[in-house]
Image: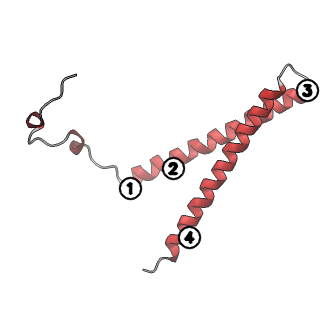
Amino acid sequence: MAIPSIMAMGSGAAPNALKTAPTTFESQQKFGNFLKEAIQDVNTAQVQSDVMTEKLVRGEDVDLHNVMITAQKASIALNATMEVRNKVIEAYQEVMRMPV
């Protein structure tokens, strides 16, 4: 693996310097989309757990351990989401208490 010399990198601007920083609106949109996708993933896990439970109740060919695993995955995802929400609310309240 060849290592380029420092002089070769020289006086030119860094490649990342040519990129413009995202605007506040773009950052908000990206963060909003990230949160929306994360909540949709939690919802998907909950729906999958419900479907597996219904199959078990109906007597369909479903292994009990698979039902329990999907239920636990959904539960953990929901609990993690609630903890993140609580931390965000705490951080917001802390910022609001700061003197101006």
First of labels 3, 1 by sequence position: 1
Q: Distance between the residues labelled 1 and 4?
A: 22 Å
Q: Mark 2 points at which residue?
A: 32
Tell me where residue 33 appears, x and y as whole percent.
Answer: 51, 45
Q: Distance between the residues labelled 2 and 1?
A: 12 Å
Q: Which amino acid does label 1 sit on?
A: Thr
Height in image: 26 above or below 55?
Answer: below
Q: Nearer the viewer, mark 2 or mark 3?
A: 3
Q: How is the image coloured?
A: secondary structure
Q: Mark 1 points at which residue?
A: 24
Tell me where residue 30 appears, x and y as whole percent.
Answer: 45, 46
First of labels 4, 2 by sequence position: 2
State which quarter of the image contains the N terminus: top left
Q: Name the residue under label 3.
A: 58
First of labels 2, 3 by sequence position: 2
Residue 70 at least partly seen? yes
Name the secondary structure under disc 3.
helix
Q: Which amino acid does label 3 sit on?
A: Arg
Q: Which amino acid does label 4 sit on?
A: Gln
Tell me where residue 73 appears, x and y as whole percent.
Answer: 70, 37
Q: Mark 4 points at which residue?
A: 93
